[in-house]
Image (cartoon, rainbow, N blue to C red):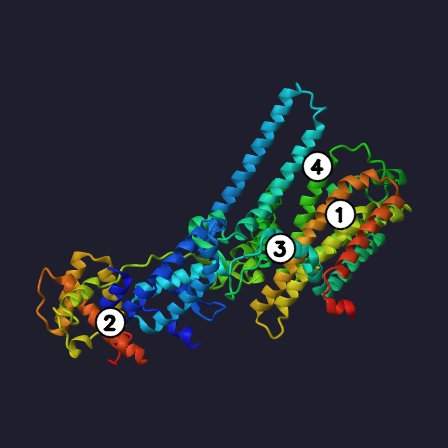
Amino acid sequence: MSDTQAIAAPARPSAEPKFDRVMVTPEGVPLRVTVASGGMRAGALMLDIAIIGGLIVLVTLAALALLWAFGVTLGGDLEKASGPLQLLAVLWIISVFLFRNAYFLYFELGERAATWGKRVVGIRVAARDGGRLTAEAIIARNIVRDIELFLPLVFLTSGEASGTMTDLTAWAGFLWVLMFLLFPLFNSDRLRGGDVIAGTWVIENVKRNLGEIVAPMAAETTQDAGVPVARYQFSDADLSVYGEYELQTLEQVLRTGQEDALEKVTASICQKIGWEPGSGDERAFLEAYYTALRARLERSMRFGKRRKDKHSAPE
Amino acid sequence: MSSEQMAGAAVLRSDRFRIEREADWTRLEEIVARMEKGKARRLSDEDVLALPTLYRTLLSSLSIARDNSLDAGLIAYLEGLALRAYFMVYGTQTSFGGWLRSFFGGGWSRAVRAIQLDIWIALSVMIAGAVLGYVLVAGDSDWFYALVPANFSDARVPGASVEALRGTLFGGQEQSGLGVFAAFLFSNNAQVAILAFALGFAFAVPSILLLIHNMALLGAMLWVFADRGLALDFIGWLSIHGTTELFAILLAGAAGIHVGRAVAFPGDRSHLEAASEAGKRAALVMVGVILMLICAGLLEGFARQLVDNTTGRFAVGGGMLMLWLIYFIGVGRDRRSRLA
């Protein structure tokens, strides 16, 4: 559990810390994942429904076009065409059934474990226990989709059509089926019924680029002079005012590299350690300070002492 | 400047650590990115072989970085890449064909055998439902109209003449559009079976109610025919596809009960663990149920109208039942139990 604790409190939590979870890989390494929020799930679902609807419309149009073609070639004699017509009807029924049930299966069984809608939103399905995502799990989570999604829809449309939706019991029934649809909102991992049954969850995709080394200039000056940190020398007292949180804030300032931010941070550091802030050389100063501070904190880290931020006791 | 020179130049040990390993990370990232784009087949053999090694190396880099480096950007990058690579290494790797082979070669029948207890529960529930429907309508024929929706009954109502009832059982040869009818029946029945399974999630109660309701309908219908001495013919008419279809609905209900039971009584596992274990097993059964319903739809649409006598219908229905039983009981047992 110590590993889990080590990353349980990240120095820089993501935008929505309440959706951050830890998943342990089969190798025993804990990885931070972000559970997809209800809004993302709903957005992906809307897209998927729109796509399925579009596919059904396309197939129907194609069938109608074929029908028209039959009509033209046979000169309106539809008696003769009953064979092909039946085939067409069978194909239509089967393709609608497949779109409704197999669309999700097919795409979630692929490498990216995500339907088109999920891909657009940037989320995917994963096994909750960190193991392999099996075909059975995908099948299970999508079979249950039927009661969650299509049952309320069918209930509403058929009830509306037969005029029973005026009934109070019909509305009670509708609320009951709606409960399945809203199930994800009642648990913190945003699991829907199918996820519970299948042991899966839906998490956000990550794609981060490897940034440059934070303080390359510090390295160059070192190389030129042959001794560490030639231009700026910081005493122990200068470096003991900050902890890891401040270091990583500084890292971010250096990575984004906005001039006014650099100036502001330089001023506040100089004030803290009682230096006179020079001007025009902020970047070199900050890189040197960053490197020295990180070297110091990493050294004590290797001895098992960590300092979270400036308020915690110096190592 | 070569990477060795850079490593020598870097002031921080953690930066040197990064520069030494960067090339491996970038290579892994390229492989993963190509796999994510669905171009896994175009990867060279070397890359495919290197993937697991690179992935494990990355995980160890990540563990080291977490303990030695305060470069938040680097750790975030490693975590993200580790997750992406993890999904590629532990993704759904079974090919569709391979999965299908294992499914028919024993996966399905093993799953069915594993939910045996639930099958017995579902079977007794179904028999009880049919008996209930029969007894209710026998006691008071008004029950029939409460149990059977209007679009099913048409000619088949209490008090209908023998000829009218016989007409619904036999003589459908001229009926056209059998294929369409079969496809429609399949789509319809599959949806009912899926419902029976999916509702099991709510502690199995709705599944059981659904089974009772559908079977009560059948029981009521049986009484109507039995009342006119056509019970055997009706059962024959039903059995040609019914042995397959009712078996499929039995399995779907049992799968639902299996999940419901796991949710309600998880034993010493957690609720979520129990549910997902049962759910994956039941999902296998359900894929089989859909296939059985395709068979049933074909039998109902074609064979029932083509085989127009009770003996023939019993032969087809009984044959199908035998086939299913042999498959479920016999296929996919491991060697030890076969020797025993």
Helix or strand or loop: what does disc 3 sit on?
helix
Chain of the residue under the numbered disc 1 shown in the image? B
**Mark 4: amino acid:** Val
- Label 3: which residue? B99
- Label 1: which residue? B148
Helix or strand or loop: what does disc 2 sit on?
helix
Viewer-side label of 2, 4: 2
Using the image as rendered, state which of residue B28 and residue B74 is in the foreground: B28
Using the image as rendered, state which of residue A287 and residue B230 is in the foreground: A287
Helix or strand or loop: what does disc 1 sit on?
loop
Name the N-terminal-most of marks 4 and 1.
Answer: 1
Marks 3/2: CA distance? 52 Å
Helix or strand or loop: what does disc 4 sit on?
helix
Marks 4/1: CA distance? 24 Å
Name the N-terminal-most of marks 1 and 3.
Answer: 3
Mark seen at residue A294: 2
Say which residue appears at 17% left-offset and 61% top-offset.
A262
Chain of the residue under the numbered disc 2 shown in the image? A
User: Crowdedness of circle 1 by 10 Å Cα count: few (<14), some, many (20+)?
Assistant: some
For the residues bearing labels 3 and 4, Cβ distance under 8 angstroms:
no
Where is residue A272, by image quadrant?
bottom left
**Mark 3 on the same chain as mark 2:** no
**Mark 3: amino acid:** Trp
Name the N-terminal-most of marks 3 and 4.
Answer: 3
**Mark 3 on the same chain as mark 4:** yes
For the residues bearing labels 4 and 1, Cβ distance under 8 angstroms:
no
